[in-house]
Image (cartoon, rainbow, N blue to C red):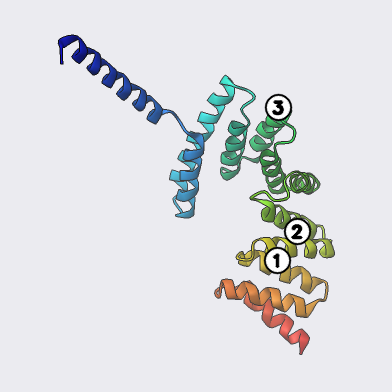
């Protein structure tokens, strides 16, 4: 290989390494968020919050560069929700929905934030919008669960029964959801249906004391 070709080859290799390094170093908000979720599952909340904050800052920078980037609004509101910064979730979600009013991911996150802010009518509104917009989306079961929670709090137990029943049909492995279903059925006087729900919660989590107590209580009602 002559000297000129060798220099060109080395230059090309160094350029390729530089480009690869740049690609690897590019901030990835979704990756940071997912690492945060994994850390949260492990109970490492301090480390999780650091990752969520990292995701938040990346998203804000991306939005500053491109206000129409709905992926950035989505991950930003997810991370803020995990940090329990519910008012900030609403603020950024509203900005995102000005760009795309139909983004169902942001709509669902707003529904959760409004629930934790005790603004139940707005939570219900946004969860219903989410279900209407994306009936087969990933968090449909969660949306029905939150609707059940709102109806339970409002003591609309028939509505809560329907919402919880739908939630557990879509996602049958959540003991808390079965317990809530048992509770509203008990409130309605449907003790047989309540017992089935409580027992399912206990099957999924044998140490679930409230569900065990609920099952014992309705068994006495049934004689």
Q: Tell me whether the residue at label 3 lies in contact with that at label 2, contact meaning CB atoms closer than 8 angstroms.
A: no
Image quadrant of residue 214? bottom right
In the displayed structure, 111 sits above or below 94; it is below
Q: Is residue 102 left or right of residue 72?
A: right
Which quadrant of the figure contains the C terminus? bottom right
- In the picture of the structure, the residue carrying the numbered disc 3 is 99
Q: CA distance from mark 3 to mark 2?
A: 30 Å
Image quadrant of residue 72? top right
In the displayed structure, 103 sits above or below 123; it is above
Comparing 221 with 11, the one in front is 11
What is the number of the mark on residue 180? Answer: 1
Q: Secondary structure at mark 2?
A: helix
Comparing 1 with 121, the one in front is 1
Q: In x, y percent, where is residue 106?
A: 67, 38
Which quadrant of the figure contains the N terminus? top left
Q: Secondary structure at mark 3?
A: helix
Image quadrant of residue 210? bottom right
In the displayed structure, 184 sits above or below 151; it is below
Give the residue drawn at x 46%, y 54%.
43
């Amino acid at each position: 290989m002559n000297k000129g070709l060798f220099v060109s080859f080395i230059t090309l290799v160094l350029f390729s390494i530089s480009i690869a390094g740049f690609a690897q170093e590019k901030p990835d908000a979704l990756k940071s968020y997912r690492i945060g979720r994994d850390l949260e599952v492990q109970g490492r909340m301090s480390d999780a919050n650091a990752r969520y904050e990292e995701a938040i800052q990346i998203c804000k920078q991306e939005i500053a560069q491109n206000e129409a980037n709905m992926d950035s609004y989505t991950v930003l509101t997810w991370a803020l929700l995990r940090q329990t910064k519910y008012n900030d979730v609403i603020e950024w979600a509203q900005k995102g929905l000005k760009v795309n009013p139909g983004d169902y991911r942001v709509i669902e996150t707003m529904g959760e934030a409004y629930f934790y802010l005790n603004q139940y009518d707005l939570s219900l509104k946004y969860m219903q919008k989410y279900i209407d917009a994306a009936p087969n989306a990933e968090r449909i079961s969660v949306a029905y669960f939150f609707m059940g929670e709102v109806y339970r709090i409002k003591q609309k137990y028939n509505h809560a029964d329907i919402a919880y029943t739908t939630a557990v049909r879509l996602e049958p492995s959540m003991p808390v959801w079965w317990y809530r279903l048992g509770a509203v059925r008990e409130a309605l006087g449907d003790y047989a249906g309540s017992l089935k729900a409580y027992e399912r919660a206990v099957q999924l989590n044998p140490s679930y004391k409230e569900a065990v107590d609920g099952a014992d209580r309705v068994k006495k009602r049934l004689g």
